[in-house]
Amino acid sequence: MNTDRGLSQAEAKRRLALHGRNVLLGATRRSAALELLARFKNPLILLLLAACVVSAATGDLESSTIIMVVVLLSVVLDFVQEHRAGRAAEELRKATRVHATVVRDGAARDVPTEEVVPGDVVLLAAGDLVPADGTLLEARDLFVNQALLTGEPYPVEKHPGSSDATAAVFMGTSVISGSGKALITQTGTNTEVGKIGVALTRQPPPTAFELGTRNFGLLILRLAMWMVLFVLLVNLVRERTWLTSFMFALALAVGLAPELLPMVVSVTLARGALRMSRKKVLVKRLSAIHDLGSMDVLCTDKTGTLTEARIRLEKHIDPQGQDSPRVLELAYLNSHFESGLRSPLDEAILRHEAVDVRGWEKLDEVPFDFERRRISVLLRRDGYVRLVVKGAFEEILRLSTHYEGSGPEDMRPLDAAARRAFFARFEDLGREGYRVLGIAWKAESPECRHVVTGDEIELVFAGFAAFEDPPKESAGAALRALRDAGVSVVIVTGDNEHVAAHVCKTLGVPVRGCLTGTELDALDVHALGARVETTNLFCRLSPTQKNRVILALKKRGRVVGYLGDGINDAPSLHSADVGISVDSAVDVAKEAADIILLEQDLSVVADGIVEGRRTLGNILKYILMGTSSNFGNMFSMAGAALFLPFLPMLPAQILLNNFLYDLSELPIPTDRVDPDFVARPHRWDMPFIRRFMLTIGPVSSLFDFATFALLLHLFHGDERLFQTGWFVESLATQVLVIFVIRTQGNPLRGKPSQALLMTSLLVVALAMFLPFTPIGPKVGFAPLPPVFFAVLVPLVAAYLVTVEVVKRWFYRRFGWG
């Protein structure tokens, strides 16, 4: 194969069909048919199907038919909603998926990494993720981070043509600097990462949100099962038939279990992700919406978020503070011949003024890393070899032993007085808002062809390169919006404290405390935990130190977001509760992030936080309503089973009641959320949910017992009339209480969504009309006398008013969860 032309599109398509997509095991989606069948693995569904078979075998075809219809409708409805939500989420993920640059038909083109095939020629550059295993064909100062495979945090230089592992590149590793061309040999599960073991193919550990939903479901299910066992025992003691008692208890379990919760959660999160996409926020992990809404600390770098990221080189001055073309020349040569990912500072140097580089030849390079904070380039011209170094001022000055006086030939010893003077000039520039790099050089022997980090010593300090990055006009308003939303912004930057403090002052951000990287290293875990509570500006930090700040905040119980877009941000994006990156970020950062911003602007983050809280608010509505309704029904069923000579509701009626109730709650994801709720962060609070359930649930039972008394003593109802009357009252109170619970304030002021209003009213109307249809007698219903509805309306109204009163007391007592 001609590696210059690469594969043809037709051959690549053939190999993709032969070898499969370049994904690890477990990343593929199941077919729609398998997704539908998987829903029948639910234990409650299996129990219902068994009950359906038992009913049919005993000749109760009506109950069998009703159970089967309810099961099929529930399963299909669940599948359709979640499948649509999953497809919407998948479309959003596709918008942010990582691409690789491959050579096809002689031209470089971007393709999704999952379409890379064996035989592809891939072009690699700084910031790229290696898409699959391969062998290097070309490399230029190519350094790769292989921590994924080896655990070694330092980058490894790669060389083509070598017989050992230095000629190989591996899937999932990241290019730190340089460039290269590789021939892909293995993809997908055949790569080294794919062979490591089952651990990499397992689902990631559940998030806090997923654990919360699971724990909630188990809580309700345990309560339901205990109550079911009690009801089953009572029915058997009262000598009702075993089959009738079993069917009743089984239907009660289904009616009380939160089987709709997974669908409501997935649909609500997917709708939230779609709404956020319209706000220029793309969600890769749906549960990250909950984390974004719960976030109370946002850690962010200064450049590009608080500033315009339109960096300009404003000054290039010698050690004496005079404008110096010599400093510009050295800085330009370093940036021009650098092969790694060019920083905005490099771009500013190259854009400032063209420098003639003819005659200069690059021999070698020590690439930039975030521990050394400098880059060195070895150059030759006219027989002279020079090592040109550019980096953080403190590091450059520390490594220098001399400085230039009137020119490169006038090298003077760098004594303590000179160091103090240069530091003072550096701090003065910082106070003016300039970001400063140090520029230095060193003469090497004419035979020198290779350099390492150990050669960066005894440098000659040439001067300062000062850059300006003006604050964003929108940043001040965005910071105020975040503060008003209860989110603290913590600035973690590699810049010095003077530059960062100048930006904060310009934007009107009070600095509560400042900590430098050197000071941070002197603190242990406990001391740092105390300092992060009183500090909002961290300066001169390495990526490892940024990660320590985030972990310390999390240990203090804070929900932490991190906004970053560079190679050095990947560890922090992983560690944060919600990693946020931008569409223009390097592949490593986008892969590590949970949320992608289409605009690098804090105002977009603020909008995303509001959408996240709205999504969480709608999920909590269903949870609070479901817990209170289900808990109330448990008490009602248990109490009725004690004194009634018949079942309070037939198994088929319970299932129908449950299905109609679930149907009425489907539009909850479309509902509005209280402004007070979105005004501050919220978390998954199980104690709050439990308190709400134990407070509101008994109110429902109280009105159920009132209905029992009216049906038995006022209407002298027989079994069918009693069951019909309670069916209607139970469904009406369950469905309509959403309009009280959905808001903390006055339910008459905060309007529900039209979809929720219409669906709820239609379901209640259907329940009232059903006993008068031909279907009614088949389900065991009897027509209700008109006077029943005259009593039902004030009863339901009294119930809603009572819940409203109790709700207001509850929120005054406990507040929002």
Image (cartoon, rainbow, N blue to C red):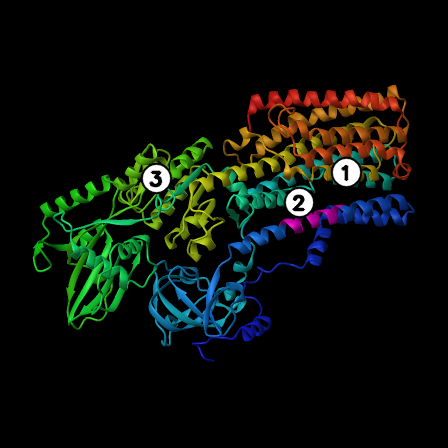
Identity of the residue drawn at 35% across and 47% down: 309
Q: Using residue 225 as the reference point, say whether residue 316 is left or right of it.
A: left
Give, as a three-letter code, the residue at label 3: Leu
Instruction: Measuring from the top left, give residue 38's x and y in whole percent.
Output: 70, 54
Q: Extreme front residue here?
A: 353
Q: Which residue is mark 1?
A: 660
Task: Identify the residue position indicated by label 2 in the image.
Answer: 263
Disc 2 from disc 1: Cα separation: 15 Å
Percent of width and height locating residue 743: 61, 28
Give residue 454's quadrant in the image: bottom left
* Magenta residue span: 74-85
Q: Are marks 2 and 3 in contact (CB under 8 Å)?
A: no
Sequence-first tag of 2 and 1: 2
Determine the CA span between mark 1 and mark 3.
54 Å
Local SS, label 2: helix
Q: Is residue 112 left or right of residue 554?
A: right
279 w.r.t. 587: above or below: above
- Mark 3 sits on what residue? 528
> Looking at the image, is mark 1 or mark 3 earlier in the sequence?
3
